[in-house]
Image: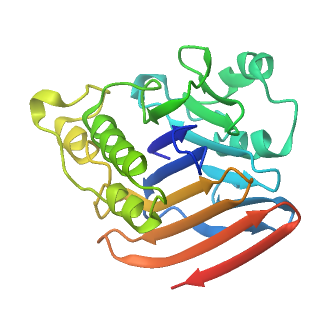
Amino acid sequence: MCILFVALKAHAEYPLIICANRDEFHHRPTEAAHFWHDNEQLLAGKDLEAGGTWLGVNQRGAVAGLTNIRDPELIQSDMKSRGELVIKALSSSELDEAWLQRYSPFYNPFNLLFGDEQALYCFDSRLKRYSQLSHGFHSISNGALDDIWPKMARGSQAIESHITTNKDPNIEDLLAIMTDGTQAPDDELPQTGVSLEWERHLSSIYIQHHEYGTRSTTIIMKDKHGKVLFSEVRYDGKGRNLGRDDFTIQPQNITTGHLT
């Protein structure tokens, strides 16, 4: 996952809204969002290379999502897959601050968002920082929570404007925000240890590149009654739409719709 935008208790009807893009190499095998056969409580896409996921929800209405922290000097090849952390957050009650502080050194650097509209947390493994999100708007990319990166500011402003001016937030409009390919000027780029060319590519909310880019966009909207709307759209290296799946989750009641 490359970027997550969160609106927490910022809308009267939808106390939790998450808009997220997963950026990854296009050759990495991936399964579209679905209810997992070996864990029917979990709705998420699946990384078929390492077996984990980047973003998901469970039947209780809890959410979890992960972004990699971009720091090439800290990356080690023998670490555990970070995607298993999202599964653990949605499937186990033992994942908390103590567990993360103890076991995070076994993973390459990450941010893990998890919880629900009552209590939503973010753990930054590089800083060993465990934070409960305040009500309002937040963004998480490949640095620290609420860093002032151009694409984080651009997306947060657009999502805040839409959510605060619409009684019924529109998934199509939120998807459009998440496909903004505007790159930041060079003098506003963060310095994260990659080349200038790649800093430019990675500076947009939606990244289109034939090797590495935005593979999918997910919109999660949880209303005040606990119903969760989950929409995932997938793309190829040329930016073409590869399909869409929509799910609605209510306690003990699941309906799905598929658009391709």
* Image location of residue 102, percent across then percent down: 76, 16
Res. 195 visible in picture: yes
Residue 176, located in which quarter of the rendered image? bottom left
236 or 172: nearer the viewer? 172
- Apparent side of residue 3 relative to residue 208 in the rendered image (left or right): right
The residue at 58%/75% (across/down) is: 245
* Image location of residue 129, percent across then percent down: 59, 15
Residue 117, located in which quarter of the rendered image? top right
* Image location of residue 142, percent across then percent down: 43, 33
Counting every numbered tag in the picture gives 0
The residue at 50%/47% (across/down) is: 1
Residue 112, located in which quarter of the rendered image? top right
**From what the image shows, is residue 79 above or below residue 203?**
above
* Image location of residue 53, percent across then percent down: 65, 52
8 or 183: nearer the viewer? 8
- Apparent side of residue 152 relative to residue 54 in the rendered image (left or right): left
